[in-house]
Image: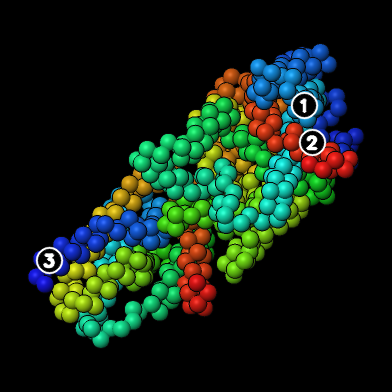
């Protein structure tokens, strides 16, 4: 569905330019951004701060000499991303590069492990039922709670894994909230990457039929209940297309073949074709139950994306650019404040709207009050780099070894 | 066996296996309950109708098995596929009605008393499904040999399992969030697809 463009007519000299590309002379400073951040020195200082954070979060501080070139490369790469974000003022463009590299690293590392250990892209029954991740945990949370109850009751302390994961999730949610989905999730880089491949050739100005935005919440409710019924992670078994990037049980019988066919279809539609054609993150925005989960619990995190009513011109660029359909535009009636774009709880702080807003009216804040752009970007990047540090350096090493014929 | 003994036995079976019954009922009942308007009286009505439907299914089977008695050599497994399929289609229809309220047909349907009584039908369709505790109950029924005994046994079994179904009412306060009700309507549609798929698979003997 397209909406009528009611923006003011562009100036003659601006015709032919990408409307989402800010003019070169526009050196707007967003609230919360260091006023000198666009300078080389300030950007380098922030990149160095980012590198220090990554160093402490990902390296073995007691013996940093043990870190090899892949770890140093990863740290240099992420601090380079911090520098580029600060120097150019474009958050989402450089975040997307970082995010896509994370996704690539995860797939390479996981698949290489699978092929190396099992000699097959499929997992056997002996390994485990399905690979477990944050998306599977959220969509079968009652099963995990029940298993944890059994573990606690039986005194099987070694079975406390999910509880530790729970604390890890709580820490990450306190630090980043919904931003996990755009800065840390190692799957999100896939549809984010595909949604950018076609650039200007993708569909623009797409708005969603009402009600469809709540699809991930519906998916979450349904799979939580049905997983509890069967005591199996049903989303993981039947619907999650991301298993194509990790591993799935051998499709030895009709049920397994049906499952493989269903989630492969979902993968083609929501990870590949949807993002390519629509330029949107279709899986993250319309399917992933973890995004709904995080939109519910992410509110405990203080970072927000805030629209400044005084600077907003209601041009709608933010809503059209949002890759996860998370900015709602009320009908153009009523008071000026009521017509402001509304940031939905599903917003995962990717920064696309911050980048495209022609007046710099959208910014990162703490609780919609205190500007916090630089603080947010540093936090998100450091945490993303820390998680990526678990697999991207290995993926780098494997790739270089494969290219140079050195094996694994 | 004395009637009180049968009642105690049925209640014991229901109380010990009721969690499984919650597993069978929750995917149907929870999304529907969450999708309905946020009024506690309506919530009570939905759960009450659902339980009444289940009770009707139990009593029907109790009477049938009581009459058949020892002549019953095979459990009526053939009912499961069609029951699941119809249950799935009803849920799908409900989700469509909620998703397209501007359509004339949907607006008319949502106001009709038949639609308000959907939980009764769903309770009945879920009730005649052969889950393991229900199968255990049926096997025992076949040995009782009297209609009164069978009805008493299954009524007590129903009472025992109901203890586990009632806590779904605790989810009702969540409905104050409008978006959650919209999401629950979507979950109803997914649940409908799921049950219709299960029903079809059973009909085609794929599972």
Q: Is residue A361 visible?
A: no
Residue B74 is at least partly visible in this image: yes
- In the picture, measured across the screen, residue B189 lies left or right of residue A33, that is left
Percent coordinates x, y for residue A190 in the rendering? 72, 45
Which label sits on residue B5? 3
According to the image, label 2 marks what residue? A397
Mark 3 chain: B
Do callouts 1 and 3 mark residues in contact (Cβ within 8 Å)?
A: no
Secondary structure found at label 3:
helix
**Residue depicted at 73% across the width and 23% down the height:** A66
Tag 1 and tag 2 share a subunit: yes
| Residue nearest the observer in this picture, B55 or A8 | B55
The front one of B46 and A166 is A166
Foreground residue, B187 or A162? Answer: A162
Tag 2–tag 3 contact (CB < 8 Å): no
The residue at the far bottom in this view is B71
The percent position of residue A126, horizontal first and vertical second, equals 57, 54
Quick check: A9 left or right of B91? right
Q: How much space separates mark 2 and mark 3, taking CA atoms?
A: 71 Å
| Residue to which mark 1 is pinned | A68
A285 and A252: which one is in front? A252
Quick check: marks 1 and 2 in contact, CB under 8 Å?
Answer: yes
């Amino acid at each position: 569905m397209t909406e009528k463009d009611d923006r003011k007519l562009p100036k003659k000299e601006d015709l032919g330019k990408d409307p989402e590309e800010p003019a070169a002379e526009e050196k707007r400073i967003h609230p919360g951004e260091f006023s000198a951040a666009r300078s080389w020195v300030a950007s380098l200082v922030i990149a160095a701060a980012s590198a220090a954070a990554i160093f402490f979060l990902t390296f073995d501080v007691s013996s940093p000499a043990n870190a090899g070139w892949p770890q140093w490369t990863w740290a240099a790469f992420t601090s380079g991303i911090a520098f580029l974000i600060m120097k150019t003022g474009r958050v989402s463009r450089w975040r997307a590069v970082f995010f896509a590299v994370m996704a690539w690293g995860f797939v390479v590392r996981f698949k290489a492990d699978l092929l190396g250990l099992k000699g097959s892209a499929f997992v056997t029954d002996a390994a485990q039922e399905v690979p477990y991740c944050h998306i599977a945990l959220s969509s079968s949370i009652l099963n995990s709670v029940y298993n944890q109850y059994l573990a606690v009751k039986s005194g099987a302390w070694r079975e406390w894994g999910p509880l530790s994961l729970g604390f890890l999730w709580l820490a990450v949610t306190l630090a980043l909230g919904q931003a996990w989905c755009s800065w840390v999730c190692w799957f999100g880089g896939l549809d984010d990457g595909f949604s950018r491949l076609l650039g200007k050739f993708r569909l623009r100005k797409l708005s969603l039929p009402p009600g469809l935005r709540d699809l991930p919440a519906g998916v979450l409710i349904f799979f939580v209940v049905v997983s509890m019924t069967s005591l199996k992670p049903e989303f993981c078994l039947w619907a999650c297309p991301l298993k194509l990037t990790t591993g799935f049980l051998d499709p030895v019988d009709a049920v397994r073949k049906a499952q493989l066919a269903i989630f492969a279809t979902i993968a083609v539609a929501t990870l590949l074709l949807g993002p390519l054609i629509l330029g949107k993150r279709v899986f993250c925005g319309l399917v992933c139950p973890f995004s709904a989960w995080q939109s519910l619990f992410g509110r405990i995190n203080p970072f927000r994306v805030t629209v400044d009513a005084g600077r907003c011109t209601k041009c709608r660029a933010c809503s059209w650019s949002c890759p996860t359909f998370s900015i709602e535009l009320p009908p153009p009636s009523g008071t000026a404040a009521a017509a402001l774009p509304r940031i939905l709880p599903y917003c995962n702080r990717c920064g696309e709207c911050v980048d495209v807003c022609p007046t710099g009216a959208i910014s990162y804040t703490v609780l919609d009050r205190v500007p916090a752009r630089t603080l947010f970007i540093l936090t998100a990047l450091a945490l993303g780099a820390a998680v990526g540090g678990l697999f991207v350096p290995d993926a780098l090493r494997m790739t270089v070894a494969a290219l140079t014929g050195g094996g694994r | 066996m004395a009637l009180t003994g049968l009642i105690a036995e049925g209640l014991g079976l229901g109380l010990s296996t009721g969690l499984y019954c919650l597993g069978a009922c929750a995917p149907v009942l929870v999304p529907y309950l969450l999708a309905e308007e946020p009024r506690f009286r309506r919530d009570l009505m939905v759960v009450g109708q659902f339980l009444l439907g289940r009770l009707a299914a139990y009593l029907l089977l109790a009477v049938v098995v009581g009459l058949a008695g020892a002549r019953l050599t095979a459990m009526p497994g053939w009912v499961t596929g069609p029951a699941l399929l119809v249950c799935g289609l009803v849920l799908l229809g409900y989700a469509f009605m909620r998703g397209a309220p501007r359509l004339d047909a949907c607006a008319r349907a949502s106001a009709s008393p038949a639609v308000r009584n959907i939980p009764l039908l769903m309770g009945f369709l879920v009730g005649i499904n052969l889950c393991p505790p229900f199968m255990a109950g049926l096997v025992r029924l076949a040995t009782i040999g009297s209609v009164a005994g069978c009805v008493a046994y299954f009524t007590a079994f129903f009472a025992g399992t109901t203890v586990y179904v009632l806590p779904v009412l605790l989810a009702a306060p969540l409905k104050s969030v409008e978006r959650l009700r919209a999401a629950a309507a979507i979950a109803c549609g997914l649940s409908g697809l799921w049950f219709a798929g299960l029903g079809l698979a059973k009909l085609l003997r794929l599972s």
